[in-house]
Image (cartoon, grey):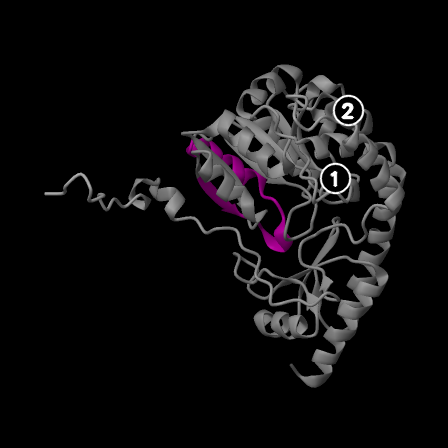
Amino acid sequence: MKTADQPLAIDGVRHIRPEIRALQVYRLAAPAQGPDAVRLHQNEAPEDWPDAVKREVAERLVATPWHRYPSARADAVCEAIGQMQGTAPSTIAATSGSNEALWAAYAAFAAGGTVVMPSPTYSMAKTLAVAAGARVVEVPLGERFALDPEAVLRVAHARRAELIYLASPNNPSGNVFSREAVLAIIAGAPGAVIVDEAYWEFTSSSYLDTLDRCGHVVLVRTFSKAMGGAGLRVGWLTAQPPVIAELMKTIPPYSLNVLAQAAAPVLVAHRDLAVSRVRMIGAERERVGRALQGLGMTVYPSETNFVLFEPGRAPAVVWQALAERGVLIRNVSGSPRLGACLRVSIGTPADNDRFLTALAHLRGAGQ
């Protein structure tokens, strides 16, 4: 029998939900990297904001009291986002990155229920759904990662799914799903539909126009890609105002800290710089794709800031060899249907040249 001065040995892990214990912690495999490493592995914007814009944010931050809570719902951020995408602030809920937006939507619509999603798709989509208390059923994408609306709807109805998750453009494949396919799913869904538009600035395809007539559709967007704000952690949900009012109940108040709330409106005010960045990335994406094809590699169509490709040899070997040359890309070969693939983010022209030169040397050396 234990005495009062002998603490009990209790296994806390066994009290964690089994489905959580079955998940893998998000870790980005990356070898040791020097200060001059080329970072083409996280789909970040290739260039930072100019110092003048940062100083403008800093001035706002200095003038903001740090001992007070910021706006509970980041009202100024929602207003700026509304101006940027052409919707009323009441249609927007700001979140700490798009991951929190996804978690909040999962918790609101599908905790204790079922989420149906294509596979492969955004790596955190399933994890966040499970963490929010949902069951996940995956439906394989078709040839060239095409979306099969009949298969998705068949599974969704059979499982009485509360939510369908779609990412378009999709990550890591980079392709935009057929508009007809997505609209068919929206029309036939037994529950709500999330469309993750993290890369919306890189494509003309968006489902913002469906929100007026489709109260069950929720869009997820982010500042982390074209807006060059990955370090700020700003994302948002867009839906009809009554839906946003309910979703806000699953988002903690003060989710965006004072830096994020100071910075987001400033970045929106200078969005012309982001628009120029998108044009540069688009041109570089096409150039990199052509160069990869010139090296005899299979390149998949992309409307994002990255390219999925097959190097024609063991992806892990190519990934490691590039890393040893200071070029970091993403090894996605462990994901379903991607066993032959690597993914490279589009960087500056100089960064892309280093990647292509290193890859050409590896091919010439037979590595």
Q: Quadrant of the C terminus?
A: bottom right
Q: Decide if residue 209 is in sight here.
A: yes
Residue drawn at 67 percent across, 84 percent down: 366
Q: What residue do we see at 77% from left, 24% from top?
A: 82
Q: Position of residue 208 (x, y in %)?
A: 73, 28
Q: Nearer the viewer, residue 75 or 146?
A: 75
Measured along the vertical axis of the image, is residue 140 above or below residue 162? below
Q: Is residue 22 magenta-colored?
A: no
**In the image, which residues are magenta?**
136-159
Residue that sits furthest to the bottom in the current view: 365
Residue 142 among magenta residues = yes
Residue 65 placement: quadrant: top right
Quadrant location of the N terminus in the rendered image = top left
Q: In x, y percent, where is residue 117?
A: 53, 41
Give the total number of marks visible in the rendering. 2
Q: Residue furthest top?
A: 242
- Residue at 65 percent across and 26 percent down: it is 67
Relative horizontal placement of residue 352, taking residue 9 as reference (left or right) = right
Report the mark closest to the observer, 1 or 2.
Answer: 2
At label 1, which amino acid type do we have? Trp
Which amino acid type is shown beneath numbered disc 2? Gly
In this image, 178 relative to 138: left or right?
right
- Residue labelled with disc 2: 82
Helix, strand or loop for disc 2: helix
Instruction: Judge by depth and name the residue closer to the eye, 187 or 37.
Output: 37
Residue 253, position in %: x, y?
59, 23
Q: On the image, numbered disc 1 is attached to which residue?
A: 200
Q: Compared with residue 343, is residue 318 higher up or lower down, i.e. above or below? A: below
Label 1 environment density (alpha carbons within 10 Å; few <14, some 14–19, many ≥20): many
Q: Earlier in the sequence, mark 1 or mark 2?
A: 2
Judge by depth and name the residue closer to the eye, 105 or 67: 67
